Image (tube, coloured by chain):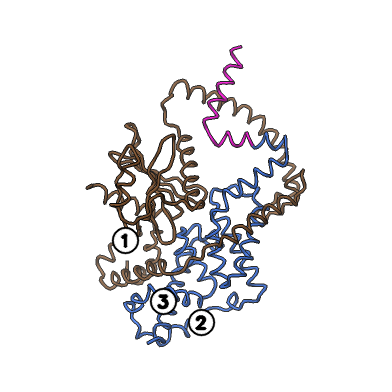
Amino acid sequence: MAAPLKIDYAFNAEDLESSAKIVKFTILKKHQEPDAAQEHELASFEETMLPHMDAAHNLAKWLLRNEEDAQDVVQEAYLRAFKSFSGFHGSNGRAWLLTIVRNTSYTLLKKNRAVDLTTTFDEEIHTAGHESVSPATILEHSENAELIKGAMDELPVQFREILVLRHLEGLSYKEIADIAQIPPGTVMSRLSRARAELRECLAARIGKEK
Amino acid sequence: MNCEEAVKLMDGYLDGELDPITSQTIEQHLRDCSNCDQAYKTHGSLIRAIGNAAPYYKASAELREQIRSSLREEMAARPMRNVESDVQPLFRRRQPGPRTVLFGTQWNWLSLGGLGLAAAIIFAAIIAVNLVPRWQRPAADQFLATQLIASHVRSLMANHLTDVASSDQHTVKPWLDAKLDFAPAVVDLASEGFPLVGGRLDYLDNRTVAALVYQRRKHFINLFVWPAAPDATRTPKIITRQGYQLLNWVDSDFDYWAVSDVNVNDLQTFKEQFAAQTSHH
C-alpha cells in the first residue's frame, strides 16, 4: 500500500509544473480522439502565432510596398507556418513567423522580377549633391511620416527589411540575423549602411523640396 | 580607439549590441573626441526619430478574420488520422532514412533510460515537496510567466488595453488607488520615450493587480504591480519566452513585472527610468 500512495503523491507534486501537465494532457487526447488533438494543435498555433499578425503584416507591407500583396503573403505565411508548426520547438514565435513572412515575400518579389532584388545600390548617384542639407535640417524633418515613408520605400529591399526589423520591431541583432538569414557579424554593418542610405535619401528629398 | 573605428562601431553602440569592454572603449573615445560625440548624438536622435515617425502597418480586422477561417479550412481538409502525413515542413530539415532507424533504436534505449530518469525526478519531487516546501522553485516563475504573457496578449487582442486611458499620472493613480487595496506609484515616462497610455485592473497569481500600460514606439509594455512578499528575492531577472521579454524587479514596496515584445535593452531602460522616477515618490 505504501508504494502506490507515494506515486500518487508524486504525480500531484509534478502537476505543480504547468508545462508537464499540458504535455500529458496532449498525449492522452491524441490517443483518444484525433479531432480533439487537431483542435488542440490549432488552438495552440493560434495562441502562439496570431498575436504576431501585426508584425507579420507590417514586415510584408514594407517589403512588398503593396497592400494586396502584403495580405496575400501574410495569409500564405500563416498557412505555411501552420503546416510546419509541429517542427517549431523554439520559444520565439515572432521571429519564426517573421522568417516565414520574409521568405514568402522574397518568393513573390522574385516571381514578379522585382528589380531591387538583384540591382546593387549605386552609392554615387545618391551621395552626390546634397552636402548642403545638414544633419540638423534632416532632424528637423524627421517627424514627417510621409517623408520618411517615401525615403524608406526608395531603399533596396534588404535595407528596408533591416530597418523595419530593428526600428519598428525592436529586434536584437541575433534575431535579425536569423530572420534575414545573414551572419550575425554583418547585421551591424548592414544596418549602419541602411541608415546612411536612408539619411542620403532624406537629404535628397529635403533638398528637392527647398 | 581612433575615430574611424569609433564610427564603424557607432551603430552597434547605439543599439546596445556591443560587448561591455568595447562599449566602454567607445564611451571613453566619445568623452575625448567632441567631433565623434557630436556625430553620435545627431545620428542617435535621427534614427530614434525615424523609428518613431515611420508608419507601422497593422493587420486589418478583415485580414485577421480571413486568416482565422483559412486556418480552420486547412485543418478541416486534413485527414483524420496521421495528422502529420501531409505536412511538408518548410524550414525543418527532415532526418534522412538511415538515421531515422538509428534514431528509433536509440529512442527505445532512451525510453528505458527515461523510466529511470522519471523515477529519479519523482523521487526528487518527493524530497522537494517534503523537505523544502517553501523553497521557491523556478517552475513557479515559469508558471507566473505564462500567466503574465497571457494577460499581456489578451490585453492587446481583446481591445481591452486600459480601463482608464490617460497619459496623466494624476488621473491613472487615483483611479487605481480607489480599486485596489494598495497604492502603486504611477509616473509618466514620455520624456524618456515611454509615454503612459493608461491603467487597468488584472487578475494574476490569485490576486487583483495593477497593470500600467506604457508605449515604446509602436509597441506596448504592460507593467504589472502588486505588493512584494516579505521574502521576495531582490535580484532582477529576465525571462524570454515566445518572443516576449519579461523583466522582474522588486523595490521596497512592490513586485514589478514588465512584459513586452520590445527588446531587452529597451525594457532595461524602461525599468531604470521607472525606478529612478518612483524612488523619490
In which quarter of the view is residue B20 placed?
bottom left
Above or below, A24 relative to B91: above
Label 3 to label 1, Cα distance in Å?
26 Å
Residue under label 3, please give it.
A199
User: Chain B colour?
Assistant: brown
Residue under label 1, please give it.
B25
How far across and down, in percent of the image, does residue B192 sit? 31, 59
Residue under label 2, please give it.
A122
User: Chain A colour?
Assistant: blue
Q: Is residue A207 magenta?
A: no
Q: Tell me the quarter of the image containing the N terminus of chain A.
A: top right
**SS assignment at label 3:** helix
Please provide the residue range marked out in magenta: A1-25
Foreground tag (3 vs 2): 3
How far across and down, in percent of the image, does residue B252 sit? 27, 39
What amino acid type is highlighted by mark number 1? Answer: Thr
